[in-house]
Amino acid sequence: MIVPVELGAHSYTIVVERGALAGVGARLRALAVGSRVALMSAASIIRFHGKTVADSLGEAGFNVTTVDLPEGEAAKTLAVAERCWDALLEAGLDRTSTVVALGGGAVGDVAGFVAGTYMRGVNFVQCPTTVLAQVDASSGGKTAINHPRGKNMIGVFHQPRLVLIDTITLATLPERDFRSGLAEVVKHGIVLDAAYFEDLETSTAPLLAREETTLERIIGGSCHLKARVVEQDEREAALRAVLNYGHTIGHALEAAGGFTRWTHGEAVSLGIVAEARLAERRGLATGATADRQERLLDRLGLPVRLSGVDADAVVAAIRHDKKARDGQVPFVLAPAIGAFRLVHDVTDADVRAVLATLGA
Ligand SMILES: NC(=O)c1ccc[n+]([C@@H]2O[C@H](COP(=O)([O-])OP(=O)(O)OC[C@H]3O[C@@H](n4cnc5c(N)ncnc54)[C@H](O)[C@@H]3O)[C@@H](O)[C@H]2O)c1
Ligand SMILES: [Zn+2]
């Protein structure tokens, strides 16, 4: 499946295809970029998929330097970015060169940040290898490293020239990471497309079995939905906030859980259920609409109940939300499956009440 992302001079395509990584060299050559490439990845991914990418780039005539990154979130630091800049200079990458990110959202975020800042921005290609990175982090152009005072605080917008999604890579993804990424897939269905949500409801079993045609359809469908949003709001001025569904409470739960209790996707799953109940509590949506969201997440093996959560910590974390404007945090709520509305006057009491309905 080919998903075009139309952003004027920044347009690119997302390719979702079994075996796509073996064609990265030819696709990059078609973009007429310079001969030097930095392949950035982490050991756990290189081990399985690095050779396919390096061979393909080499066969297409590229001069490849591999830059090893730490695993997961540990890659998203200024020290690692600095090490990458050093490696790129050392290898002689110039303004026509390309950074290729092979990995999950963490690799993509730091590699994108390096690509967006090195010599004021060089070509960037995303080869995402987790569900989360494939359906969410790899497209849209947001890049970031973390600051001791907050996640993703330092970054630039830098769109990739190409996103290559090879569904083969998901075969090696640990089960918990696989399911976590599905929370973003469900999110896209809830706020953007009722038919897509229904497809998820009927495809739960083949999806969890990672059946090939289902993976390509669901992941490609999710990329398509996100692309349509990004096209209308490249810099997150307004509409792109819709992608934040489940994330206002989700991020707060992540913070309250010390970023170790739940994966991002698990926290988003809980955030979706809480925000679905918020819409119900505010009289915006029926209980049945919230039930449907909760049921699908539960069937996908994602958490939908809370225990041992400090509601005060969650409320305090919401106040620190990066999206807060003048102290008010806007909530994206879903009045029905396939629809959304921004609500600006959610109170702490509302949040406490819905956390209680989840068992907190
Ligand atoms: N830029 C954006 O728009 C955006 C959007 C959402 C999330 N993010 C960021 O994404 C990050 C989370 O990404 P993630 O969930 O992909 O986690 P991750 O990148 O930390 O990867 C999870 C683990 O899986 C391993 N791994 C990755 N692919 C694998 C594969 N195919 N087989 C075996 N192991 C594999 C990784 O090495 C890592 O240890 C966060 O830092 C978050 O802030 C960015
Ligand atoms: Zn998310």
Image (cartoon, rainbow, N blue to C red):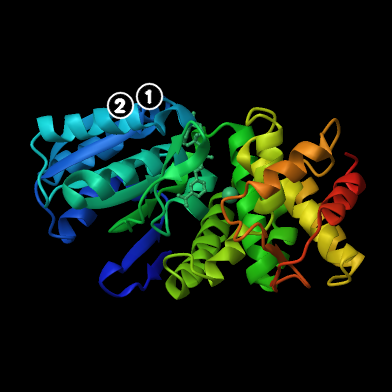
The local crowd at label 2, few if under 14, some if 14 to 19, many if 20 or more residues have their Cα within 10 Å, is some
In the picture, measured across the screen, residue 243 lies left or right of residue 143, that is: right
Image coords of residue 16 (percent x, y): 42, 57
What residue is disc 2 on?
A: 68
Q: Residue at x 78, y 72 (%)?
A: 335
- The label shown at residue 340 is none
Q: Amino acid at mark 2?
A: Asp
Q: Toward which corner of the image does residue 71 lie, by quadrant?
A: top left
Image coords of residue 336 (percent x, y): 78, 72
In the picture, measured across the screen, residue 163 lies left or right of residue 294, that is: left
- The label shown at residue 43 is 1
- Mark yes or no: residue 302 visible: no
Please state which of the two labelled residues, at mark 2 or mark 1, is closer to the viewer: 2
Q: Is mark 1 within 8 Å of ligand 1?
A: yes
- Mark yes or no: residue 74 visible: yes
Screen quadrant of the N terminus: bottom left
Looking at the image, is 74 positioned above or below residue 297?
above
Q: Is mark 2 within 8 Å of ligand 1?
A: no
Q: Nearer the viewer, residue 314 or 33?
A: 314
In the picture, measured across the screen, residue 146 lies left or right of residue 336, that is: left
Q: Nearer the viewer, residue 227 or 347?
A: 347
Q: Residue at x 66, y 36 (%)?
A: 255
Q: Are marks 2 and 1 in contact (CB under 8 Å)?
A: yes
In the picture, measured across the screen, residue 131 lies left or right of residue 350, that is: left
Q: Amino acid at mark 1?
A: Ala
